[in-house]
Image (spheres, rainbow, N blue to C red):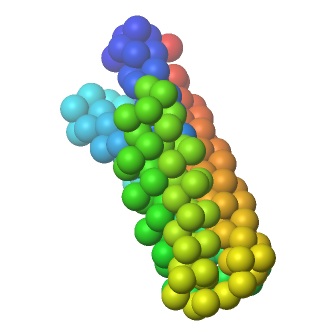
Amino acid sequence: MSVFFTALFLLALGVCVLLNLVTLPGNWAMVALVTAWALLVPGNSLNTLFFIMFIGLAVAGEIVEFGAQIWGAKKYGSSKISTWAGILGAIIGAVFGAPFMFGVGAVFGALFGAWAGCFLAELLIRRQPSAVAFRAAQGAFVGRFLGMVVKFGLGMAMLALTASNLWPDTL
């Protein structure tokens, strides 16, 4: 395959990595595109070991994204119900924030949604004082942010892994 098409493909994967920043499943879009490349481009060097590592990174991204939020919320004193309310809030916030600032609003929506979901659950369901609810919500916010950053980093690792396997084929 020509250098031009390989570079164009890697650019498309780079756009997929950026989708992680707006809380869309960019790593899974990369898995779909790389799988299509492996099936459609003859003679590529994408073998079983590559796909085990590649899909493993995508799975790790999902686990870390939600696991970090759970960890952060618990570390700051959140209950189980409030932790799950924070996760649901992050998803809802990302969806409602997505139309703003060319999709970047999804980042702020997810972070605010994680905070608000946890805060409201602590305050309204568990009847905690606002200071306790605020601290738990801070944990959900911090954990969500950490999860988003790590998932983005894993997406970059997936891009680097793919690039290192495709460039030798084109040169």
Q: Quadrant of residue 77?
A: bottom right
Q: Residue furthest left?
A: 40
Q: Nearer the viewer, residue 21 or 136?
A: 136
Q: Nearer the viewer, residue 93 or 144?
A: 93
Q: Give the image location of residue 52, x and y in percent.
A: 46, 58
Q: Give the image location of residue 137, x and y in percent.
A: 67, 69
**Residue positioned 52% across, 59% down in the render:** 113
**Residue positioned 45% across, 16% down in the render:** 7
**Residue positioned 59% across, 54% down in the render:** 111
Q: Give the image location of residue 73, x and y in percent.
A: 67, 75
**Quadrant the N terminus occupies:** top left
Residue 136 lies, with reference to residue 65, above or below; the image says: below
**Residue positioned 69% across, 56% down in the render:** 146
Q: Residue furthest bottom?
A: 126
Residue 39 lies, with reference to residue 68, above or below; the image says: above
Residue 163 at least partly seen = yes
Residue 127 lies, with reference to residue 82, above or below; the image says: below
Q: Give the image location of residue 49, x and y in percent.
A: 47, 55
Residue 1 is left or right of residue 39, and the answer is right
Q: Quadrant of residue 152?
A: top right
Residue 101 lies, with reference to residue 161, above or below; the image says: above
Residue 54 is left or right of residue 83, and the answer is left
Residue 17 at least partly seen = no
